[in-house]
Amino acid sequence: MPTIRPSTDLRNNYNEISTLCQNSKEPIFITKNGHGDLAVMSIKAYESLINKMELYKLIDEGLHDLETGNVREYSAAMKEIREGLRGGRS
């Protein structure tokens, strides 16, 4: 169940809201005049969310490459990587 707090708590009880955010992996929803206004979360939770989004994006790109045939054999890919690491020297 999401944590919902009024905007006055953000102003009057900042430390309490900050502690809630630090102890929760989920955002705290802030209302203004009874309606949703903000979602507040710790930096740690935000960075985790961004990292997940980046991972999902990379997985989606990989699936798209698979669907369109933009793939190559493992041995050919590893050979190219090794050559790149050696600076193109054989």
Image: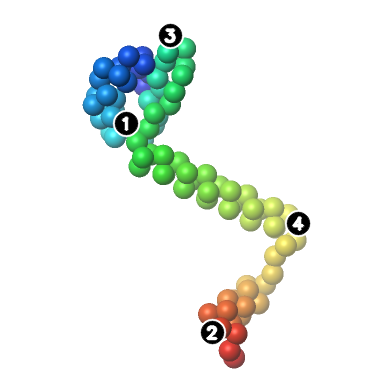
Q: Quadrant of the C terminus?
A: bottom right
Task: Determine the CA span between mark 4 and mark 1.
Answer: 42 Å
Q: Which residue is mark 4?
A: 68
Q: Which residue is mark 2?
A: 86
- Compared to residue 69, the image places residue 8 above or below, namely above
The numbered dot on residue 33 is 3
Work out whether residue 59 can be spotted. yes
Q: Amino acid at mark 4?
A: Thr
- Neighbourhood count class around disc 2 (C-alpha, 10 Å): few under 14, some 14–19, many 20 upward: few
* In this rendering, the label closer to the viewer, 2 or 3: 3
Q: Is 48 on the left or on the right of 21, as rendered?
A: right
Mark 1 touching mark 2, by CB under 8 A? no
Task: Determine the CA span between mark 4 and mark 2.
Answer: 31 Å
Work out whether residue 2 can be spotted. no
Where disc 3 sits, the SS reads loop
- Neighbourhood count class around disc 4 (C-alpha, 10 Å): few under 14, some 14–19, many 20 upward: few
Q: Earlier in the sequence, mark 1 or mark 2?
A: 1
Task: Determine the CA span between mark 1 and mark 3.
Answer: 22 Å
Task: Please name the residue shown 32% across and 31% down the image.
Answer: 21
